[in-house]
Structure formats: C-alpha cells, structure tokens
Amino acid sequence: MQALVDYGFFYVINHGIDDALMKSVYAESASFFQQPMEEKMALHKNSSHRGYIPPDFEGFEADAGGKGDLLECFHIGSGVDGDSKNPVNQWPPAERFPYWKETMKSYYQCAMGTSKRILSLIALSLDLDAEFFKPDGSETILRPIHYSGRAIESKHGSDHGANAHTDYGMLTLLSTDGTPGLQICRDKDGRPQLWEDVHHIDGALVVNIGDLLERWTNNVYRSTLHRVLMVGKERYSVAFFVWPSPDMMVTCIESCCSEANPPRYPPIRSDEYLEQRLTSTYKYK
C-alpha cells in the first residue's frame, strides 16, 4: 500500500470488469453525449444529484479557483437494481437508448464488486476487519464523462476539462479511453504546484483515494489533487465514486494516530460531509 502513502493513486489490472462491458459503456456514453444540448438538458441533474450535468456547471470550489469545469457528465447512483423505495435515478428514453440502462446497471454492479475487494485490502493494511469500509446503501455514483476537445467559452474563465480538485469519498475507480490529460499534484500545498501526467495503461483502472479515507487515516493515505487538461482532442472516461454508508462515523483509525501524532480532524458522519462538499461544488447554481 506504499502507493497510497506516496501518491494516493495506483493502477489495478485483473479487476474483474469485462472488456466487452467497458466498450459498451463507452458506446452508450458517446451516443448520449452526441445529442443536441436541449435533449440532454431534459434529464438535467435533479435535487438528488442524478442526471445530466452540462459544461461549466460544477467545480466552483477553492481548489478550482472559482472556475467551472468544461466537462459534461451524467450521474447514476444507488438503487440501480430497482429495489429503492425512492427511485431518483434518471434514464434516457428506452425507445431511443434501449441498452443504456442495463449497460450502466451492469457496470455499476461490477465496479461495486471491484471496489469492495480493494477496500477490503485497504482495511487489512490498517489493521481493521476486512469489512470495515462498507459502501452498501451509500451515495456511490457512476459518472460517464465527456470532454469535447474544443474550446468552450466559460463565464468563469476556465480552460480545464476538470479543474484541480480532490475527490470527496473513500475511493474512485477511473477508466479512460486513452486520451491524455489527467494529471496529479502530490504536494497540494506546495508552491509552485508540480504536476505529473497519469499515463494510460490498456485494460487497467486508475484508482485514487478520496478525502474521507484521508481523514480516516489521519493523512497517512493521501487524497491527491488532480485535474484534467484540455488537449485539443475529444476524451471519454468513466468514474465510479465510492462512499461509505451514510450513517457511518468517520473517526481517526487507531493505527493512524498516537500521542505524538494526534487526530487532525474531528469525527463527522459520512452523509454530513457529502452534503457539505456538494453544497460547495454547486453553490453558485
């Protein structure tokens, strides 16, 4: 787990997500994002943060310098099995996108299985029970993403596909189409900031730690600042943001603190932290 200490990012191969399924996710994603804007906006993000998010809509945080991201994306959350009492996910019309829903559901379930296996290994590395990090019932989000590759005039002056930020939750799984642009900054407090490219490896997922796992580990494992540059070429990716159960208390793990290294953060409930970060991200909309 040294990569979590040094980088907060690592690659995973043999992750159990079928290549054919991955190709289907990209095909369905492209078919949706190629629609006219007015048709995509018919599924605009609802109050539960599910649905379509257009360019220049999010990213208004201190890390982003007050600039909107130039990506467009679609949020799909828990309840994909249809057993939720509050089915808040939005779906493109089945008559035009007959395979979208089932494809995204299949990927969500596979990515959740992969995430649980990785989280079990992380828990064991921290002298915890393998099932300590429980994403069941959480607001874990599947997010197909599209970067147009061409300049878009932003009212906030952004020139990045995704401005510099850290992820909110425990863990993020990322698949990309191989187009470059993703960069990390290992020292987020350093000036000047030094950025390193994250190179594509065919068949591998890029995995990174989120803020809650950094809090849990008292900064032993790192939630690393990252961004996506516009490189003049269209880019697709698929992110899977993994959260703990909403009522879980995030308190410094015993193996990560001592008398000489006391807890840096107060305890907080997972859902309270999520709400704080979402409010910050979308506060200007």
Image (cartoon, rainbow, N blue to C red):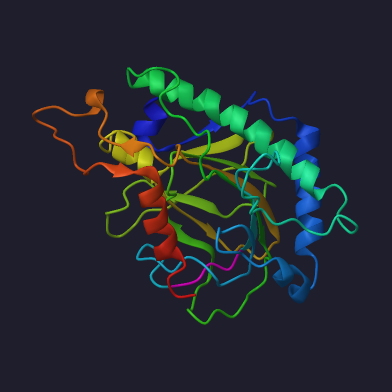
Q: Position of residue 73 (x, y in %)?
A: 64, 59
Looking at the image, residue 157 sits to the left or right of residue 193; the answer is: right
Where 246 sits versus 203, above or below? Answer: below
Looking at the image, residue 72 sits to the left or right of residue 261; the answer is: right
Whether residue 12 is visible, yes or no, is: no
Looking at the image, residue 117 sits to the left or right of residue 273; the answer is: right
Where 4 sits versus 87, above or below? Answer: above
Picture quarter with the N terminus = top left
Q: Position of residue 174 (x, y in %)?
A: 59, 42
Residue furthest left in the image: 259
Q: Which residue range is magenta in the image?
A: 67-71
Occupied quadrant, residue 114: top right
Q: How many marks?
A: 0
Residue positioned 42% across, 49% down in the render: 168
Q: Is residue 238 magenta?
A: no
Residue positioned 27% across, 59% down in the render: 191
Residue positioned 40% across, 24% down in the render: 132
Q: Is residue 68 magenta?
A: yes
Looking at the image, residue 255 sits to the left or right of residue 2; the answer is: left
Q: Position of residue 272 (x, y in %)?
A: 36, 51
Q: Main secondary structure of the magenta part?
A: loop
The one of 172 and 50 positioned closer to us in this rendering: 50
Residue furthest front in the image: 85
Q: Position of residue 250 (x, y in %)?
A: 32, 38
Whether residue 210 is visible, yes or no, is: yes
Residue positioned 56% across, 59% down in the render: 49
The one of 85 and 44 positioned closer to us in this rendering: 85
Occupied quadrant, residue 222: top left
